Amino acid sequence: QKLQTLLRRIQKHTEEYRKMTVLKTKLTILLLISGVLMMLVGCVIPLMYPPPEAKSTLAAKGSHHQFTHNAKLLIGLGLTVQYVDLAPVWLKLLFVIINIGCWTNPFAYLVVAFSGETNELFGPDVFEGNLPLGKYSSLSGNLLLVCVMTI
């Protein structure tokens, strides 16, 4: 009786370990894909530099940097997720939150670049006076706030 109970417990733990390994492998692959895709987007922006429709080339250049730096963060997390000891729900939440944070940051810069409007988080001097003062984009500000809150 005790041996059967012990065998059932071992089997249960083995099944849980297998499920966690599969989940971590999937999250690793998805984070690496997301990071490589973000790196590609970041590398495409300089190819069309300066973007003809951009009102602030400095903000467009900033979005290139944000795409590539955040891509490195995603790839790094993708390589280390195998060693994170969290419950499955928290691992999935980590994946969603880190992707949201990493993708919203460079898009905030793109909004500034193409709208020509900065936000309160950048301040008036960040883009060296290339943007009209007093014009604020709530979209870019909210994207930056999402990034700050998630990363």
Image (cartoon, rainbow, N blue to C red):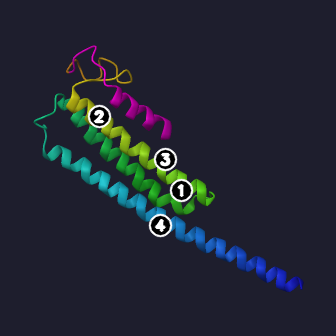
**Residue drawn at x 44%, y 36% as measured from the top left:** 146
Counting labels gives 4
Q: Residues within 10 Å of mark 3 (few under 14, many from 20)?
A: some
**Disc 1 target residue:** 92
**Disc 2 target residue:** 109
149 drawn magenta: yes
Residue 143: % across, % down:
38, 34
Q: How far apart, in angstroms, are the residues tagged by discs 3 and 1?
A: 9 Å
Q: Looking at the picture, which amino acid does disc 2 mark?
A: Tyr
**Disc 3 target residue:** 97
Q: How far apart, in angstroms, are the residues tagged by discs 1 and 2?
A: 27 Å
Q: Looking at the picture, which amino acid does disc 3 mark?
A: Ile
Q: How far apart, in angstroms, are the residues tagged by discs 4 and 3?
A: 16 Å
- Of helix, strand and loop, which one carries label 1? helix
Residue 34: % across, % down:
36, 56
Residue 129 is marked as none
Q: Is residue 8 left or right of residue 71?
A: right
**Disc 4 target residue:** 26
Q: Looking at the picture, which amino acid does disc 4 mark?
A: Lys
Q: How far apart, in angstroms, are the residues tagged by discs 2 and 3?
A: 19 Å
- Of helix, strand and loop, which one carries label 2? helix
> In the rendered image, which quarter contains the N terminus?
bottom right
Residue 60: % across, % down:
22, 35
**Residue drawn at x 42%, y 49% as measured from the top left:** 99
Which portion, as a residue range, is magenta? Answer: 131-151
Q: Residues within 10 Å of mark 2 (few under 14, many from 20)?
A: many
13 drawn magenta: no
